[in-house]
Amino acid sequence: MPAPMMDTYAPPDLVFDRGEGVRLITDKGERYLDFISGIAVNCLGHAHPKAVAALKAQSEKLWHLSNMFKVPQGIELAKKLTDATFADRVFFTNSGAEAMECALKTARRYHYVNGNPQRYRIITFTGAFHGRTYGAINAGGNPKYLEGFGPAMEGFDQVEFGDHDALKAAITEETAAICVEPVQGEGGVRALPEACLRGIRELADEHGILVIYDEVQSGAGRTGKLFAHQWVEGAEPDIMASAKGIGGGFPMGACLATEAAAAGMVVGTHGSTYGGGPLATAVGNVVFDELTADGFMDHVVEVSNFLRQQLHGLADRHADKVVEIRGKGLLVGIKLKDGFDPKKLAGLCRERKLLLGAAGDNVSRMAPPLIITKDDASEAVAIMDEALGELQANA
Ligand SMILES: *Cc1c(COP(=O)(O)O)cnc(C)c1O
Protein backbone atom coordinates (compact mmCIF):
# COMPACT_ATOMS: atom_id res chain seq x y z
CA MET A 1 0.00 0.00 0.00
CA PRO A 2 1.44 3.44 -0.85
CA ALA A 3 2.13 5.76 2.06
CA PRO A 4 -0.67 8.33 2.43
CA MET A 5 1.66 11.25 3.06
CA MET A 6 3.69 13.00 0.35
CA ASP A 7 7.37 12.22 0.66
CA THR A 8 8.40 15.81 1.37
CA TYR A 9 9.73 14.79 4.80
CA ALA A 10 11.60 11.71 5.98
CA PRO A 11 10.75 11.36 9.68
CA PRO A 12 12.40 8.72 11.88
CA ASP A 13 10.44 5.72 13.06
CA LEU A 14 9.26 7.31 16.29
CA VAL A 15 5.88 8.59 17.44
CA PHE A 16 5.65 11.37 20.00
CA ASP A 17 2.45 11.35 21.89
CA ARG A 18 2.84 14.23 24.34
CA GLY A 19 5.18 16.85 25.67
CA GLU A 20 6.04 18.17 29.11
CA GLY A 21 8.25 21.25 29.30
CA VAL A 22 11.53 20.38 27.60
CA ARG A 23 10.65 16.68 27.18
CA LEU A 24 8.85 14.87 24.39
CA ILE A 25 7.35 11.50 25.26
CA THR A 26 6.70 8.69 22.80
CA ASP A 27 3.65 6.46 22.62
CA LYS A 28 5.80 3.86 24.40
CA GLY A 29 6.57 6.25 27.25
CA GLU A 30 10.18 6.98 26.29
CA ARG A 31 11.33 10.48 27.23
CA TYR A 32 13.45 12.65 24.92
CA LEU A 33 15.20 15.93 25.68
CA ASP A 34 13.88 18.33 23.05
CA PHE A 35 16.64 20.66 21.83
CA ILE A 36 14.97 21.63 18.58
CA SER A 37 11.42 22.47 19.80
CA GLY A 38 9.68 22.15 16.45
CA ILE A 39 12.48 24.26 14.97
CA ALA A 40 12.44 27.24 17.31
CA VAL A 41 8.70 27.14 17.85
CA ASN A 42 7.84 25.78 21.31
CA CYS A 43 9.61 28.62 23.11
CA LEU A 44 7.77 28.00 26.40
CA GLY A 45 8.26 24.26 26.17
CA HIS A 46 5.46 21.78 25.66
CA ALA A 47 2.07 22.01 27.36
CA HIS A 48 2.90 25.26 29.17
CA PRO A 49 0.10 25.53 31.77
CA LYS A 50 -0.76 29.18 31.03
CA ALA A 51 -0.82 28.64 27.26
CA VAL A 52 -2.94 25.51 27.68
CA ALA A 53 -5.36 27.39 29.95
CA ALA A 54 -5.68 30.28 27.48
CA LEU A 55 -6.32 27.93 24.56
CA LYS A 56 -8.84 25.88 26.55
CA ALA A 57 -10.73 28.94 27.74
CA GLN A 58 -10.85 30.49 24.27
CA SER A 59 -11.84 27.18 22.65
CA GLU A 60 -14.96 27.07 24.80
CA LYS A 61 -15.98 30.60 23.81
CA LEU A 62 -15.19 31.28 20.15
CA TRP A 63 -12.91 29.59 17.60
CA HIS A 64 -13.19 31.63 14.46
CA LEU A 65 -14.66 34.93 13.48
CA SER A 66 -13.09 36.21 10.23
CA ASN A 67 -11.34 39.53 10.00
CA MET A 68 -14.58 41.04 8.73
CA PHE A 69 -15.16 41.50 12.50
CA LYS A 70 -12.86 42.89 15.18
CA VAL A 71 -10.84 40.34 17.12
CA PRO A 72 -10.11 42.00 20.50
CA GLN A 73 -7.39 39.50 21.44
CA GLY A 74 -5.63 40.32 18.18
CA ILE A 75 -5.85 44.06 18.74
CA GLU A 76 -4.48 43.55 22.25
CA LEU A 77 -1.53 41.52 20.95
CA ALA A 78 -0.85 43.98 18.12
CA LYS A 79 -0.72 46.77 20.72
CA LYS A 80 1.80 44.81 22.79
CA LEU A 81 3.95 44.07 19.73
CA THR A 82 3.97 47.65 18.53
CA ASP A 83 4.70 48.99 22.04
CA ALA A 84 7.67 46.63 22.29
CA THR A 85 9.17 47.25 18.84
CA PHE A 86 9.90 49.74 16.05
CA ALA A 87 6.51 48.99 14.52
CA ASP A 88 3.20 50.86 14.46
CA ARG A 89 1.10 48.37 12.51
CA VAL A 90 0.59 44.60 12.49
CA PHE A 91 -0.92 42.10 10.08
CA PHE A 92 -1.42 38.61 11.54
CA THR A 93 -0.83 35.47 9.51
CA ASN A 94 -0.78 31.71 10.10
CA SER A 95 2.85 31.07 9.27
CA GLY A 96 6.26 32.53 8.59
CA ALA A 97 5.99 32.29 4.82
CA GLU A 98 2.74 34.24 4.93
CA ALA A 99 4.33 36.87 7.17
CA MET A 100 7.11 37.17 4.57
CA GLU A 101 4.60 37.43 1.73
CA CYS A 102 2.94 40.29 3.57
CA ALA A 103 6.32 41.92 4.19
CA LEU A 104 7.26 41.76 0.48
CA LYS A 105 3.86 43.04 -0.62
CA THR A 106 3.98 45.86 1.96
CA ALA A 107 7.38 47.01 0.67
CA ARG A 108 6.26 47.08 -2.95
CA ARG A 109 2.98 48.80 -2.14
CA TYR A 110 4.86 51.46 -0.17
CA HIS A 111 6.76 52.53 -3.27
CA TYR A 112 3.67 52.16 -5.43
CA VAL A 113 1.56 54.53 -3.35
CA ASN A 114 4.50 56.93 -3.05
CA GLY A 115 4.63 57.34 -6.82
CA ASN A 116 7.51 54.96 -7.47
CA PRO A 117 5.93 51.84 -8.96
CA GLN A 118 9.23 51.12 -10.74
CA ARG A 119 10.73 50.29 -7.36
CA TYR A 120 9.76 46.66 -6.90
CA ARG A 121 13.01 44.70 -6.71
CA ILE A 122 14.03 43.08 -3.45
CA ILE A 123 17.65 42.38 -2.55
CA THR A 124 18.22 39.22 -0.51
CA PHE A 125 21.29 37.27 0.61
CA THR A 126 22.90 33.93 -0.11
CA GLY A 127 21.92 31.29 2.41
CA ALA A 128 18.62 33.06 3.04
CA PHE A 129 15.47 31.15 3.90
CA HIS A 130 12.11 32.89 3.86
CA GLY A 131 9.63 30.01 3.56
CA ARG A 132 8.12 27.78 0.87
CA THR A 133 5.48 29.83 -0.91
CA TYR A 134 6.31 31.14 -4.39
CA GLY A 135 7.29 34.61 -3.22
CA ALA A 136 9.31 33.16 -0.37
CA ILE A 137 11.27 30.59 -2.41
CA ASN A 138 12.10 33.24 -4.95
CA ALA A 139 13.21 35.62 -2.21
CA GLY A 140 15.27 32.84 -0.63
CA GLY A 141 16.83 32.02 -3.97
CA ASN A 142 17.97 28.52 -2.96
CA PRO A 143 18.13 26.62 -6.29
CA LYS A 144 17.12 23.38 -4.53
CA TYR A 145 13.81 24.90 -3.45
CA LEU A 146 13.12 26.48 -6.86
CA GLU A 147 13.91 23.50 -9.05
CA GLY A 148 11.00 22.15 -11.02
CA PHE A 149 8.54 24.81 -9.93
CA GLY A 150 8.49 26.80 -13.13
CA PRO A 151 10.22 30.03 -14.12
CA ALA A 152 11.94 31.98 -11.39
CA MET A 153 9.90 35.01 -10.35
CA GLU A 154 11.09 38.42 -11.49
CA GLY A 155 12.19 41.01 -9.00
CA PHE A 156 14.73 39.42 -6.68
CA ASP A 157 18.46 40.13 -6.62
CA GLN A 158 20.77 38.12 -4.42
CA VAL A 159 24.12 39.15 -2.99
CA GLU A 160 26.67 37.36 -0.83
CA PHE A 161 25.75 37.28 2.89
CA GLY A 162 27.78 39.97 4.66
CA ASP A 163 29.32 41.46 1.48
CA HIS A 164 28.62 45.17 1.86
CA ASP A 165 30.29 46.20 -1.40
CA ALA A 166 28.25 43.68 -3.38
CA LEU A 167 25.13 44.98 -1.65
CA LYS A 168 26.00 48.58 -2.58
CA ALA A 169 26.59 47.57 -6.17
CA ALA A 170 23.27 45.71 -6.37
CA ILE A 171 21.17 48.76 -5.50
CA THR A 172 19.45 50.38 -8.48
CA GLU A 173 16.61 52.82 -9.14
CA GLU A 174 14.31 49.79 -9.10
CA THR A 175 15.25 48.55 -5.64
CA ALA A 176 12.32 48.53 -3.23
CA ALA A 177 13.83 46.83 -0.21
CA ILE A 178 16.70 44.90 1.31
CA CYS A 179 15.54 41.78 3.10
CA VAL A 180 17.69 39.93 5.60
CA GLU A 181 17.57 37.53 8.55
CA PRO A 182 19.57 39.12 11.41
CA VAL A 183 20.51 35.54 12.28
CA GLN A 184 20.17 33.08 9.43
CA GLY A 185 18.54 29.83 10.52
CA GLU A 186 18.19 27.27 7.71
CA GLY A 187 21.19 28.77 5.89
CA GLY A 188 23.55 27.58 8.60
CA VAL A 189 22.77 29.48 11.81
CA ARG A 190 24.87 32.50 10.89
CA ALA A 191 24.52 35.76 12.80
CA LEU A 192 24.99 38.82 10.62
CA PRO A 193 27.66 41.05 12.20
CA GLU A 194 26.11 44.05 13.96
CA ALA A 195 28.01 46.46 11.73
CA CYS A 196 26.35 44.86 8.69
CA LEU A 197 22.86 45.46 10.08
CA ARG A 198 23.74 49.10 10.73
CA GLY A 199 25.34 49.34 7.29
CA ILE A 200 22.19 48.01 5.64
CA ARG A 201 20.07 50.58 7.49
CA GLU A 202 22.37 53.42 6.42
CA LEU A 203 22.46 52.33 2.79
CA ALA A 204 18.70 51.99 2.73
CA ASP A 205 18.21 55.47 4.18
CA GLU A 206 20.62 56.93 1.67
CA HIS A 207 18.67 55.43 -1.25
CA GLY A 208 15.08 55.64 0.01
CA ILE A 209 14.89 51.86 0.25
CA LEU A 210 13.01 49.90 2.92
CA VAL A 211 14.63 47.37 5.25
CA ILE A 212 12.81 44.09 5.85
CA TYR A 213 13.93 41.75 8.60
CA ASP A 214 12.91 38.13 8.56
CA GLU A 215 12.86 37.35 12.28
CA VAL A 216 10.66 34.30 11.91
CA GLN A 217 13.33 32.13 13.53
CA SER A 218 15.52 34.65 15.37
CA GLY A 219 12.64 36.46 17.08
CA ALA A 220 10.30 35.64 19.99
CA GLY A 221 13.08 35.80 22.56
CA ARG A 222 15.31 33.24 20.83
CA THR A 223 18.48 35.34 21.16
CA GLY A 224 17.71 36.86 24.56
CA LYS A 225 15.89 39.91 23.20
CA LEU A 226 12.32 39.89 21.97
CA PHE A 227 13.77 40.29 18.46
CA ALA A 228 17.40 39.68 17.51
CA HIS A 229 17.93 43.07 15.86
CA GLN A 230 17.13 44.74 19.19
CA TRP A 231 20.69 43.88 20.26
CA VAL A 232 21.90 46.42 17.71
CA GLU A 233 21.40 50.12 18.09
CA GLY A 234 20.54 52.11 14.99
CA ALA A 235 19.39 49.11 12.98
CA GLU A 236 15.62 49.10 13.17
CA PRO A 237 13.80 47.83 10.10
CA ASP A 238 10.78 49.30 8.35
CA ILE A 239 9.06 45.95 8.05
CA MET A 240 9.54 42.66 9.88
CA ALA A 241 8.22 39.13 9.54
CA SER A 242 7.70 37.14 12.73
CA ALA A 243 6.28 33.67 13.33
CA LYS A 244 7.48 30.37 14.83
CA GLY A 245 7.98 31.22 18.53
CA ILE A 246 5.37 33.97 18.76
CA GLY A 247 2.61 31.36 18.83
CA GLY A 248 4.57 29.05 21.13
CA GLY A 249 3.35 26.12 19.01
CA PHE A 250 -0.02 27.45 17.92
CA PRO A 251 0.27 28.38 14.23
CA MET A 252 0.71 32.11 14.02
CA GLY A 253 2.77 34.74 12.25
CA ALA A 254 2.83 38.50 12.01
CA CYS A 255 4.07 41.17 9.67
CA LEU A 256 5.05 44.32 11.53
CA ALA A 257 5.64 47.70 9.90
CA THR A 258 6.11 51.35 10.66
CA GLU A 259 3.22 53.70 9.93
CA ALA A 260 5.07 55.02 6.87
CA ALA A 261 6.00 51.60 5.48
CA ALA A 262 2.44 50.32 5.92
CA ALA A 263 1.03 53.25 3.93
CA GLY A 264 -0.02 51.12 0.97
CA MET A 265 -1.76 48.38 2.91
CA VAL A 266 -5.24 49.81 2.87
CA VAL A 267 -8.65 48.15 2.80
CA GLY A 268 -8.80 45.41 0.21
CA THR A 269 -5.07 45.14 -0.53
CA HIS A 270 -4.38 42.04 1.55
CA GLY A 271 -6.20 39.48 3.64
CA SER A 272 -6.28 36.14 5.41
CA THR A 273 -9.18 33.96 6.47
CA TYR A 274 -7.58 32.62 9.63
CA GLY A 275 -4.77 35.07 10.35
CA GLY A 276 -5.10 36.66 13.79
CA GLY A 277 -8.04 34.52 14.82
CA PRO A 278 -9.21 34.30 18.45
CA LEU A 279 -7.49 30.98 19.22
CA ALA A 280 -4.09 32.02 17.87
CA THR A 281 -4.08 35.46 19.41
CA ALA A 282 -5.39 34.23 22.78
CA VAL A 283 -2.32 31.98 22.94
CA GLY A 284 -0.10 34.67 21.41
CA ASN A 285 -0.94 37.08 24.23
CA VAL A 286 0.13 34.54 26.84
CA VAL A 287 3.35 33.77 24.97
CA PHE A 288 4.14 37.49 24.68
CA ASP A 289 3.42 38.07 28.39
CA GLU A 290 5.69 35.18 29.39
CA LEU A 291 8.52 36.27 27.07
CA THR A 292 8.38 39.81 28.43
CA ALA A 293 7.90 38.84 32.10
CA ASP A 294 10.52 40.05 34.56
CA GLY A 295 13.68 37.99 34.32
CA PHE A 296 12.66 35.81 31.37
CA MET A 297 15.17 37.28 28.89
CA ASP A 298 17.83 37.35 31.61
CA HIS A 299 17.30 33.61 31.92
CA VAL A 300 17.66 33.12 28.16
CA VAL A 301 20.91 35.10 28.13
CA GLU A 302 22.32 33.29 31.15
CA VAL A 303 21.44 29.77 30.05
CA SER A 304 22.55 30.40 26.47
CA ASN A 305 25.92 31.73 27.67
CA PHE A 306 26.29 28.59 29.78
CA LEU A 307 25.33 26.31 26.88
CA ARG A 308 27.71 28.08 24.50
CA GLN A 309 30.55 27.85 26.99
CA GLN A 310 29.94 24.10 27.31
CA LEU A 311 29.76 23.76 23.54
CA HIS A 312 33.08 25.56 23.07
CA GLY A 313 34.61 22.95 25.36
CA LEU A 314 32.95 20.26 23.27
CA ALA A 315 34.28 21.82 20.06
CA ASP A 316 37.81 21.79 21.54
CA ARG A 317 37.50 18.13 22.55
CA HIS A 318 36.31 17.22 19.06
CA ALA A 319 38.42 19.62 17.03
CA ASP A 320 38.87 16.87 14.43
CA LYS A 321 35.12 17.05 13.66
CA VAL A 322 33.84 20.47 14.79
CA VAL A 323 34.78 23.72 13.04
CA GLU A 324 32.99 26.26 15.23
CA ILE A 325 30.01 27.16 17.38
CA ARG A 326 27.72 29.74 15.77
CA GLY A 327 24.50 31.66 16.07
CA LYS A 328 23.11 33.81 18.85
CA GLY A 329 21.42 33.07 22.17
CA LEU A 330 19.51 29.80 22.02
CA LEU A 331 19.75 29.58 18.25
CA VAL A 332 22.92 27.53 18.12
CA GLY A 333 24.87 26.07 15.22
CA ILE A 334 27.65 23.52 15.51
CA LYS A 335 29.49 23.56 12.19
CA LEU A 336 31.00 20.18 11.34
CA LYS A 337 34.04 19.58 9.18
CA ASP A 338 33.46 18.48 5.62
CA GLY A 339 32.81 14.78 5.47
CA PHE A 340 30.83 14.67 8.73
CA ASP A 341 27.08 14.68 8.41
CA PRO A 342 24.90 16.69 10.84
CA LYS A 343 21.94 14.39 10.10
CA LYS A 344 24.02 11.40 11.16
CA LEU A 345 24.98 13.26 14.32
CA ALA A 346 21.29 14.00 14.99
CA GLY A 347 20.60 10.27 14.57
CA LEU A 348 23.29 9.33 17.10
CA CYS A 349 21.91 11.89 19.55
CA ARG A 350 18.39 10.60 19.00
CA GLU A 351 19.52 7.08 19.92
CA ARG A 352 20.61 8.69 23.21
CA LYS A 353 17.28 10.51 23.66
CA LEU A 354 18.38 13.98 22.61
CA LEU A 355 16.60 15.71 19.73
CA LEU A 356 18.39 18.26 17.61
CA GLY A 357 18.25 19.44 14.02
CA ALA A 358 20.42 20.22 11.06
CA ALA A 359 20.78 23.31 8.90
CA GLY A 360 22.59 24.28 5.71
CA ASP A 361 26.37 24.71 5.46
CA ASN A 362 26.97 21.39 7.28
CA VAL A 363 25.67 22.65 10.59
CA SER A 364 23.98 20.88 13.51
CA ARG A 365 21.24 23.04 14.92
CA MET A 366 19.99 23.49 18.48
CA ALA A 367 16.91 25.61 19.18
CA PRO A 368 15.66 24.36 22.54
CA PRO A 369 12.69 25.77 24.44
CA LEU A 370 13.78 29.01 26.08
CA ILE A 371 12.92 27.55 29.50
CA ILE A 372 15.79 25.02 29.54
CA THR A 373 17.88 24.91 32.70
CA LYS A 374 21.66 24.65 32.98
CA ASP A 375 21.14 20.98 33.88
CA ASP A 376 19.26 20.45 30.61
CA ALA A 377 22.11 22.16 28.76
CA SER A 378 24.72 19.97 30.50
CA GLU A 379 22.71 16.85 29.72
CA ALA A 380 22.48 17.77 26.05
CA VAL A 381 26.20 18.55 25.80
CA ALA A 382 27.14 15.25 27.50
CA ILE A 383 25.02 13.36 24.95
CA MET A 384 26.54 15.37 22.09
CA ASP A 385 29.97 14.53 23.45
CA GLU A 386 29.26 10.80 23.25
CA ALA A 387 27.59 11.08 19.86
CA LEU A 388 30.47 13.13 18.40
CA GLY A 389 32.89 10.53 19.71
CA GLU A 390 31.02 7.91 17.78
CA LEU A 391 30.40 9.94 14.64
CA GLN A 392 32.18 8.44 11.64
CA ALA A 393 33.16 10.30 8.50
CA ASN A 394 30.94 9.74 5.48
CA ALA A 395 31.95 6.66 3.51
C1 LIG B 1 10.71 28.88 9.20
C2 LIG B 1 11.06 30.14 8.55
C3 LIG B 1 10.19 30.72 7.60
C4 LIG B 1 8.93 30.05 7.14
O1 LIG B 1 8.02 29.86 8.17
P1 LIG B 1 6.80 28.85 7.95
O2 LIG B 1 5.98 29.02 9.18
O3 LIG B 1 7.37 27.49 7.78
O4 LIG B 1 6.09 29.28 6.72
C5 LIG B 1 10.55 31.95 7.07
N1 LIG B 1 11.68 32.57 7.43
C6 LIG B 1 12.54 32.03 8.33
C7 LIG B 1 13.77 32.78 8.71
C8 LIG B 1 12.26 30.80 8.91
O5 LIG B 1 13.11 30.27 9.77
Image: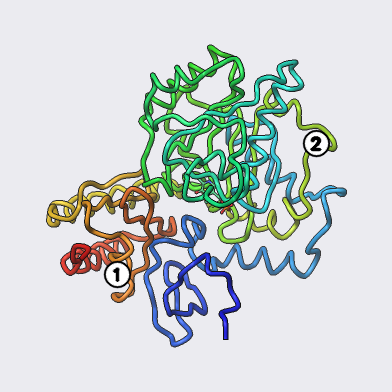
The image shows residue 121, relative to residue 58, as above or below, that is: above
Q: Amino acid at mark 2?
A: Thr
Between residues 165 and 234, which one lies in front from this camera angle? 165
Q: Residue at 43% across / 55% down in the picture?
A: 370
The image shows residue 194, relative to residue 342, as above or below, that is: above
Residue 73 shown left or right of residue 353 in the figure: right
Q: Residue at 42% across / 33% down in the picture?
A: 231
Give the labeled residue for mark 1: 349
Q: Quadrant of residue 393?
A: bottom left
Closer mark to the observer between disc 2 and disc 1: 2
- Residue 122 image point, x, y percent: 57, 29
Query: Please, what secondary structure does the residue beneath circle 1 have?
Result: helix
Tell me: is circle 1 under 8 Å from ligand 1.
Answer: no
Between residues 72 and 227, which one lies in front from this camera angle? 227
The image shows residue 278, relative to residue 105, as above or below, that is: below
Q: Residue at 37% across / 26% down in the picture?
A: 163
Residue 125 shown left or right of residue 53 in the figure: left
- Residue 161 image point, x, y percent: 39, 32
- Residue 81 image point, x, y percent: 63, 40
Query: Please, what secondary structure does the residue beneath circle 2 have?
Result: loop
Q: Residues within 10 Å of mark 2 (few under 14, many from 20)?
A: few
CA distance for labels 2 and 1: 47 Å
Q: Residue at 59% across / 24% down in the picture?
A: 210
Residue 323 shown left or right of residue 126 in the figure: left
Identify the colour scheme used: rainbow
Q: Amino acid at mark 1?
A: Cys
The image shows residue 56, relative to residue 216, as above or below, that is: below
Q: Which mark is residue 269?
A: 2
Q: Residues within 10 Å of mark 1 (few under 14, many from 20)?
A: many
